[in-house]
Every structure is written in structure tokens, then in C-alpha cells.
Amino acid sequence: MSRYADVTELIAERAADPAERMALEATAARVARALERPVPYRPEFRAELRSDLLQAARRLRRPWYRRMTVLGPSVAAAAAVAALALGLHLWQAPSVPAPEQIVQQTPRPEAPGLGLEAPETGDTAPPSQEPYLVALPSDLPTADLADEPQSALTPALMAPVAAAPTEGVQLKRLTARPSEADFRAMARRLGFRGQSRRTAQGWVVAEDDRTLSMTTDGTVRYEDLSESPDGPPVSEQAAGQAARRFLDQALLPVHSQPDIRTDADGYTVVYTEHVDGRPVVNARTEIGVDLSGTVVRATAYVASGVTTHATYTDYVTEQEALSLAEERGGSFQRGDLVWVRSVAEETVYLQPVWRVLGTDAEGTPVARYVPALKP
Amino acid sequence: MRCRREGPPTHRTELSQEYIDEQRLVEQAKGDPEAFGKLYDLHFERIYAYIHRKTGDRQTAEDLTADTFMKALANIQGYRYTGQPFAAWLYRIASNVVIDYYRVRRPTLPLEEGLPLVATQVAPEEAAMTLDDQQAVARAVRTLSPDQQDVILMRFAGDMKLKDIAAALGKTEGAVKALLFRALGTLRHKLSESGVR
């Protein structure tokens, strides 16, 4: 039994008497005989998983300068147009910069990683080469958010944000969008066994009372309508842990402390992501946990890198934002620059938006959102 | 006992060439998808078998094996050599994946035993007895505590040294020895109750 000499030694050391020693050695030999045999698996599963892993590995390891190619020909065409515009600008450069000058930064290599991370140093990062003029993206949606009662703002949303930059505001974009393979992998990780199907917005899989969906822009929704097991109600802390485990299992990374709200039927655990010290106000990860500690619903976002699309030197200032907010009624005292997630056809943007605090025309304390980019 | 090898070395008495090659492959896999594919080829059977034996269900084993390797891929940049084989790191991920699975999922009825392979050269009666014994052992192992299951499976099915099991489970070698000894004692009683021999 030389292969199991350590087991034999252990038994010899700890067995109470020779009879127990012999019995335990026989048990060990029997267990070894049974467990040494290989476990059969489906070869097609092994091959499929290998293929999924290699695809995921290539996506993770792809150098930044090759990522453009996977975004489709439209992005390549846009790059060509930008290059042409640059050529024309250099050939016929204006003597005085126009007041609405827009600065485009050359993309920089992104740090590898899955999370919503801002690989650049933010507003203070110097451009890597001479700026040139570009227009606002033609597909950029209007950042039009309704007023939000201040009582509904979580501590994470109300935490102090980075000071507004003086030299320009940035428009950011997410660098990756999910594929069906990503959805299938997430469904598997969450224990779904059925076939996923394509919908107009993305993919969905349903099984028993559970449903998981993902849109092509990376919004994930999960619902579990099955009956909760009886038992003592879990604590707020346990609900937070359940939410975190769910996110870990689905590989949906969050990088912030949660705000936990107590509801009638359980808890809602809310994570607010920050980019360059500013919250993304309309894309909060929300996990519903029932009193038994089961995750019953979730809205979350697939991880993606963040890169600067452009810096705009002519933008709505805080004072202008307060005036624009008051034009819609009410009185506003201060503003913070925050991000709004906007989904365009090919791109997901993070737009800079002023969140101004004050009271609306009825005197209710609200947060009002005013786009910082001039149309 | 018969000696069987399903992958790269999981234990060693010295830094063998095979082990050095594995570490080199791991470093390569941090930047090269094909190298990660080779690591997958080397460790798939071991990890799948471990998870299948812990869950007793093929579909669940497939899901959790996929989860384990996806997590390994996502985290391999942070892998650092600490004196343990790469398999110990993978087992640790697999163990956590199984624990998380049962935390998120509601408790279910015990799952039915998968059918292990039986050598085809043996006589049908002997094969049936062997199959019965394998199933009895698998059932008995699944009655152990999660930690005891891990130690038994990693030692006997995964062919790992006790100190590497300790590293994989984040325990001391002494604690692993205690778990193993207690697990053998429990299995002895369970198997004698089962009547299968």
C-alpha cells in the first residue's frame, strides 16, 4: 500500500487497537478501489466547455488594439471617418479654435479585467497625443431621467463625489458587450439546465419557476417565483451575504458596499457602481432576497471595461445646470456631476449628467438630472 | 492497490521535471488561451469526477465543472506558486463552487448515483458486485460532512498528498489528518451497515 503509505501510517498512529487498525485499513483499501475508478462524462460536454473557455480566454486576453475589430465594421468605418476628418482638419486648420471645440483622446490600452473599471486616470489624464475635433456620437441617446425624490436616494448615491473638472467633461463608453456564450455560461453557473432562446432584446432561459434573461447591452434580470421554505427570517447581514454569493456565482462583479433596504417580504440589496469617483445613477445592481435568505429577483449588469470616448471642453456648467433645472420649476442649490448609462444601437455610453438637488414646484425635495453635454 | 494517473502530478517528493513543466504551463496560460486549453485537458477529468462525486448528478456536475474552470480562467492572473500543485488551487475553486451551489439553491432531495465505469473484461457477476460496491462507497461518502468528503475524494480519487489537501482546503495538515481518520471511521460503519462487499 505504498501509494497510501501516509494513510496507513495515520491509521497505525491513531487506531485504538490492532482490530480497529485492520478494519480501517480494509475500509481505506475498499474506498480507494471504488474511488480510483474514473467517472464517465459526456465527451461532447468536455469539448463544448473547452471551446467556451478558449473563446472566453481569447476575449479576456485580446490586446486593446484588436478589440476594435470585434465591434463590427461600423466602428471601423467610424474610425476611418475620424481619421479623414483629422486629415482635413490638419490640411485646413482654423486659426482660432471654435468655442464648441471637442477633444478626442486616442484610446489607450485597457487593463485586463472583467469588472466595471476605469483603466484611465480620469479627468486629469493628459491626452497621449495632440487633440483633434470630433462631433458628439450620432447615436448618443438623450439622457432624460425623471426627477427622483431625495428620500429614495441611497447613501451610496449621496456619498460625496469627485469635484467637477474645469477643463472638460468626458463621455465614456463600455468596451465589451455580452454574447450568447456569455449568457449560456451564466445560466449554467446559476443552475439552469434548459436551452436558452433568443429574444428581440437578447436571450432568456426559464426553468420551473426561475427565469434568467440578458439583453445584448448587458442588462441581466433574474426571477425566482418558487415558494420559499419555512424557517426563521434571516438577518440583514445574511441577506447581504446571499446577494453577494449570487453575484459571485453569476460572475457579476460589484466594487462597492451595498445599501440594504428592508421590505415587507425581505430585503433589497443595492450596489451603486462608481467610475472616476462618480456614481452611475441609473444602473444600480438590485438583488431581492426573501426572508428565507433566497435570492428571488435581481437586476444587474454584465462586467465591462470603461474607456474615454471623448472629452468635451464646451459643456453645461454647474451654474447653468441649476438655471436649466429651475426653468422646469422649483428651486435648486447645488449640483454633482454623475454618470447615466445610455444604450445606443452599437454602444453603451456613460454620459456625464448634473444631478442637482433642491425642491420641485410642489416643494418636494428632489434630485433633478440635467445633461452636461451640449447637443 | 492499482496505480492510476489521470493527469499531471498532484503530489511529489521533489521538484520533478513534470511539475516544473506544469508551473511553466500555468505561467503561459496567463497570456495564452491555448495553454489554458492544455491545462483544462490535464485537469478536466479530475475536477469533473470530484464534483460529480460530491453532487451525484451529471447535469449539476457539468454546470459546476464549467463554473469552476470559468472562475479559474477569470482568476488565473492572480495565481501564484505557493509550493502546492496547480490541482490544489483548482480543487479549492471547485470546493467553493460546490459550497456556493448548495447555498444559493434550495435544498433538494438526495440525488441518484451516477453509474461509474466498470472494466468490461470482468465476468458479469463480478462486474455487478463491483458496481454495487462502488455505489455503496459513493453513497457512504456522500453522508460524510463536506470537509470529510473533500479529504476522502482528494486523497483517494484525486491522489493528493495530505499537505496539498490542507492547502486546497485552507486547513492545517493536522486538521486534515483528523478529518481523514474520522471519515474512515464513519465509512467503516456505514459500509458495514450497507451489507455490500
Image: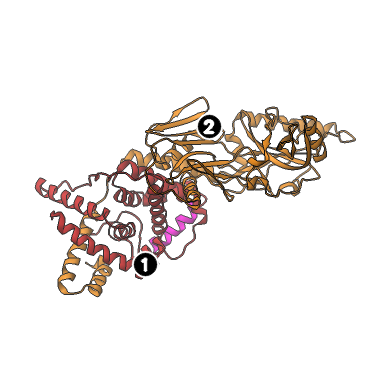
Mark 1 to mark 2: distance in Å? 46 Å
Q: Which mark is residue A215?
A: 2
| Marked residue chain, label 2 | A
Q: Position of residue B142 (x, y in %)?
A: 27, 53
Identify the magenta region: B15-29
User: Chain B in the picture: what colour?
Assistant: red
Pinpoint residue A107: horizontal percent, then vertical percent: 68, 42
In which chain is the residue bearing label 1? Answer: B
> Label 1 sits on what residue type?
Lys
Mark 1 secondary-structure assignment? helix
* Residue furthest top as drawn: A200
Residue sticking out furthest to the right: A95
Foreground of the two, A235 or A278: A235
Q: Chain in orange?
A: A
* Viewer-nearest of discs 1 and 2: 2
- Tell me the crowding category of disc 1: few under 14, some 14 to 19, or many 20 or more residues within 10 angstroms, Cα based: some
- Which residue is drawn at the image coordinates 66% and 29% (left, top)? A77
Main secondary structure found in the magenta portion: helix
